[in-house]
Amino acid sequence: MTSPSVPEVPVRSVADYVEAGTRDNTQKSYAAGVRHFEETWGGLLPATAQRVAEYLAAYGATQSLNTLRSRLAALAHWHQSHGFADPTRHTLVRQTLKGIRAVHNVQERRADPLQLRDLTVLDAWMANAIAAADGCGDRAMGLRVRRDRALILLGFWKGFRGDELLRLRVDQVTVIPAQGMLIYLPRSKGDRLAAGVTHRVPALSRLCPVTAVEAWREAAHLTDGPLFRAIDAHGTVRAGALHANSLIGVLRRAFARAGLAGAAQYTGHSLRRGFAGWASGSGWDAKALMEYVGWKDIQSAMRYVDTPDAFGQSRIEQGLAQHPPAVPSLALPPPSAVPEPTPDRTFVVSLVLRLAASRSRRGAAQAHRAIEFVCLQRHAAVAQDAARTAYVLTVAATDELALSETMATLMEDIHRIADNHGAVADTVAQHDDGRLRWD
């Protein structure tokens, strides 16, 4: 009697499991950081502490501290994974980074939080838009607004990160009638051991994420695969998930159509910050907020909270009440006029952009189009050659410091978009008088 055959299980290497244990976004960030060190700056690996410190100094004035730290992490990971001593731990490297922080310290830029009042306005507009689309038979618009409504309400009420929302799959969502939903995330930023986390999403009397997700899933006929997907102009729901770069565009387009002011200031973090601020202002203590959203430390939670310091205000007002202001015996001179705010100046900047394909020519071409649309269009870029490698930008900024910050952000965005499309960006920009340069 022959024994039943046992299906062969593919044998995986140690490297396979190490790669699986690293988040996709982290892997991309490491790869981009190493490419920037080698290809953009011209460094050699393995590197010495002196060369890493020189690399930091070369970009200390034009790159943000978070970007520099990310690239140090990439270099550290490369050396450790290849069995070399980690030069980023050397005192020289740490002191160089500390000096850059002291000389070029700027306030961290944060996305505007989505306030509950604006979410209410947005949801009402979406409900009307869905009704109008269904009434005129516009399937594409009806699907698109239902998807955006589900994405925004779920992202707000659970404080999900953008990448977590876009990685959600239909089979990870379980609806419990009259209670809410269970959402399983196999991996997330806070889940360092990749053990998987199940989140409970409550059903609400209004602005309900459960109702919105169910309406989208039913209208799109989703039974498996990614939960949030692209939709073409004919109303066809794509098989793949929304691209990570499209989330900000989806949010800003929805906010703008609903008439919300400052739509261009919102990002995926606006949902998370909006909920954190609302919860804190509604009396949630830090521990409850951390448990609900999934933060592991109080510092992470407080970065997302922008509520007024009610305790400090109360204490100060009590002290002021004990010492009423003295009544002046002499007439005071009239207050001076409030100066007008300094208007933005315009700076002319020359930019050279070259893209090399790391995987395919198509990816480089797509990256070029995305960079022109997302990054260069907002600065009124004018191409100077047929190959569209040289541009003249008109950048609005209050002063040269603000100009440098804007250009540093622009360069970061260009490299990020190129990396997401499997391309490598080589960029250099210069102010028209030659005194300022960014690369």
Image (cartoon, helix red, strand yellow):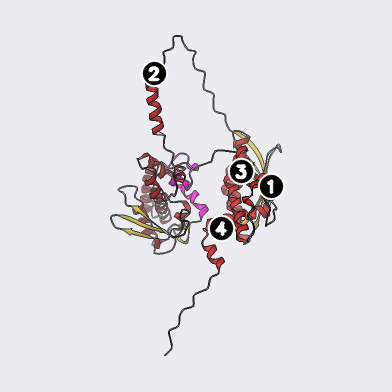
Instruction: Identify the main secondary structure in magenta.
Output: helix
**Mark-to-mark CA distance, 2 and 1:** 58 Å
| Residue 306, image quadrant | top left
Marks 3/1 in contact by CB < 8 Å: the verdict is no
Residue 81 on the magenta segment: no
Please give the residue where the numbered disc 1 appears in the rendered image: 54
Please give the residue where the numbered disc 3 appears in the rendered image: 408
**Mark-to-mark CA distance, 4 and 3:** 23 Å
| Amino acid at pointer 3 | Ala
| Amino acid at pointer 4 | Gln
Q: Which residues are magenta?
A: 244-272
Q: Is residue 351 visible?
A: no
Residue 260, which numbered label? Answer: none
At which x and y percent is residue 106? 57, 38
Q: Secondary structure at mark 1?
A: helix
Q: Secondary structure at mark 3?
A: helix
Please give the residue where the numbered disc 2 appears in the rendered image: 324
Residue 27, which numbered label? Answer: 4
Q: Secondary structure at mark 4?
A: helix
